[in-house]
Amino acid sequence: MKMADLSTITSAFQEIKNRAESHWRALYDSGKPVIMVGTATCGRAAGALEVLKAIRGELKRQNLNCPVIEVGCMGHCYAEPVVIISKPGYPSICYGHINPVITERLVKEFILGDNPCFEFVLGALEENDLVPSFSDFPRAKYEKRVILKNCGHIDPTEIDHYIAKGGYSALVKALQMQPEQIIEEVKRSGLRGRGGAGFPTGQKWEVCRRAVGEPKYVICNGDEGDPGAFMDRAILESDPHSVIEGMIIAGYAIGARYGYIYIRAEYPLAVERVQVALRQARKLNLLGNHILGGDFNFDIRLFQGSGAFVCGEATALVACIEGKPGIPRPRPPRMATRGLFAKPTAVNNVKTLAFVPQIINNGTDCFAGTGTEQSKGTAVFALAGKVVNTGLVEVPMGTTLRQIIFDVGSGIPGGKRFKAVQIGGPSGGCLPEAALDLPIDFDSLTNAGAMMGSGGMVVLDEDDCMVEIARYFLEFTQRESCGKCTFCRLGTKQMLEILNDITQGRGKIDDIGMLSQLAEDVKAGSLCGLGQSAPNPVLTTLRYFRDEYEAHIKEGRCPALMCQDLVAYYIVPEKCERSCDACVGTCTVEAISANKKRIKVVDQEKCVKCGTCLDACPPQYNAVVKLSPPSEVPGSE
C-alpha cells in the first residue's frame, strides 16, 4: 500500500476515533447515573425487556433524564436479568435477578438517594471499599476475558462504543502491514479454529491466499446448533463489531473482496444486531470500497441459515449460500482452494474471527503466552445443565474441568453428586468424575474420547441416566443427518433403535457389542464431521459408564431412575396422610384414588409416569416413591 494511502487511512480513522471517544466520555462526564440493562437473548428470556420498560417508566415518573443503555450478555446468565448502574461517587454496581418491582426501588433509593440496595448486588465492576467486585469472586482467578471483554459493557448497536474501547484500531494497524505479515502473525500466535476442529487459522489463510482463483471469500460460520451452546450467539448479540473487524482483516490477509456472515434464522436478535453493525461500519467507510480512503475494497453480506445442524459443516454451509441443499461434499478439494462458488474461501468460526483483532493489536506473544503448548489462548464455554452458575466463561486453555465446573460454576445445585459432563455438543463425549482434572485443550479432550467442539459444556448429576443421555444426543444427530451417507443414515438409526430398546427394558446383552461395532463403523464410513462424531456420546458412555448399560439390560433397572419404562410410582401406606389429597388433585390421568382407609393407591395401568404426584406430595409426608425396577410396595393395594 502506498504511503499516501497509509496517511489517509490513519487520519481518517483518527477523526472517527476522536468522535467516538468524545461520545463515550460525554456519556459518563454528564454527572448523571448511567444505567445499563442486559438485553441479550438470555436476559430477554428472564424478563429483561420488562425490566427495561419499568426502568424507563420510573425514570419518567421521577422526572429523571438518565441515560439507559441496552447491552449484551456479561456471561452471568444465572443472574439474569442483570442491571448495571454507574453513579458518580460510586463504583459501577451490577445487580442480579432484577424485576420491575426491584427497579422501582433502585431508582428511588439509589438513583435518587444514597442506598445502593446491597441485597440485590451481584458485584462491582471495579475494586472498591463499598461492595465486593467481580475480581474478588473465586472464579476470577481462573477467568481471562479476551473476546468477552466488551460483552455486557457496551451497546452493541452503537459503533462508537466499540471504537472508544479500542475497536477497529487493529484494522488500521493491519492495513499498514503486508498481507503475508498478518498471516505470519496469526501463525505465530498459534490460533486454532474455535469451531471444533482446531485447524491452525494462519495455515488456512496462507493456503487460501496462495490458491488460484478470483474473487476470494471470507465466511463467518455462526451456525451454532449444539444443544446447550450459545457462545457464538452471545458474541454476535453483544459485540458484533469484533467479528466484523476480524473478518475485514482476514479478507485483507487472503486477498478477498467479499465476506458472508452465516447465522441461523433462529437467532433473530443476533441477526438484527449484526445487520445494524454492518450498516454502521459501511457508513463510516470501514466496509465497502476504498476502506478508510485506501485501496482495499471489502464488503460483507449476512446470510440466514434455515437451522439444520449439518449446515454447520463448512461444505454444507457453502452449499446453502449458493442456493443448494445443505449437504456436505467430499474433501479434497478443501474450502481454502475451492469453496464458495468454486473459489478459494476461508471459513472461520465466530470466536476465531473475534480473536484476530486482539492478536493484531496486542501482539502474538500476548495470545501465545496463554494456554498450553499445543492449544494457545483462551477458550469460551457455555456452562449449562446441573450447575449453580450457568452462563459464559472464558478461561485459558489448560484449565481443568474441575476448575470450570466447581470454581467458576460453583458446583452442583441441591447437594447432588456430580456424574459427568457432556462437552463438545451432540458430537462430543460424556466424561466422568475421574476426568475432572483433565486440562481442557484440543488434544487432551480428543484423547479422552470427547472434543472441544464449539464450546458447549452440559453438566450432569446423579439423577441423569447416561444411557438415556447417549440416546438423547444420538436421536438429535440422527434426526439432523442429511442422509447422504449410508453409514450415517442407517447406522445411527440402528444404534438409536438399540438404545431405545435398552432404555425401554427390551435390551439384550449382545446389544452392547453391537452398539460399539456400529459406532466404529459409522465413524469410519461417514463423509462429514457430523457422522464421524455422532457416535461419540455412545462410545464415551460405553467406555466410562458400562455398568449402567448392564444394569438396564441384566437387571431391568435404571440406576438414575430416569428411564420411564423402567420406573414406577407408588405411595407408601405408612407415610400417606389420609386427609391430604394433593397427589389425587394433580394427577392428570386420574390414576390415583383412595381405598377404604383413605390411603392413596396408584393404578399402574393408568399411570403415565409424569412424576407430578411426587412433586405434589408435601415434604413432611414424603409418601410418594419412585422405584426401579418397578415393584410392589408392601401394603400398597
Image: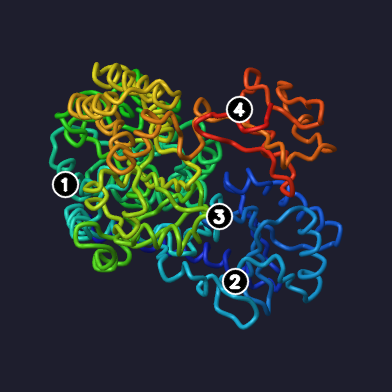
Between tags 3 and 2, which lies in front?
A: 3
Circle nearer the N terminus (3, 2): 2
Give the colouring mode of the picture.
rainbow
Between tags 4 and 3, which lies in front?
A: 4
At label 3, the amino acid type is Pro
Residue reaching furthest to the front = 635
| In the foreground, 85 or 65 | 85
Q: CA distance from mark 4 to mark 3?
A: 24 Å
- Give the residue at x 53% y 30%: 567
Where in the figure is residue 216, as x and y percent of width and height? 24, 36
Circle nearer the N terminus (4, 1): 1
Q: CA distance from mark 4 to mark 2?
A: 46 Å
Is residue 199 in view from this perspective?
A: yes
Q: Residues within 10 Å of mark 2 (few under 14, many from 20)?
A: many
At label 4, the amino acid type is Lys
Q: Are marks 4 and 3 in contact (CB under 8 Å)?
A: no
Q: CA distance from mark 3 to mark 2?
A: 25 Å
Mark on residue 206? 1
At label 2, the amino acid type is Ala
Reading the image, the residue beneath label 2 is: 124
Mark on residue 413? 3
- Give the residue at x 30% y 51%: 249
Where in the figure is residue 286, as x and y percent of width and height? 41, 50
The quadrant of the rendering that contains the C terminus is: top right
Q: Are marks 4 and 2 in contact (CB under 8 Å)?
A: no
Between tags 4 and 1, which lies in front?
A: 4
Q: Residues within 10 Å of mark 4 (few under 14, many from 20)?
A: some
Q: Are marks 2 and 1 in contact (CB under 8 Å)?
A: no
Q: Are marks 4 and 1 in contact (CB under 8 Å)?
A: no
Reading the image, the residue beneath label 4 is: 609
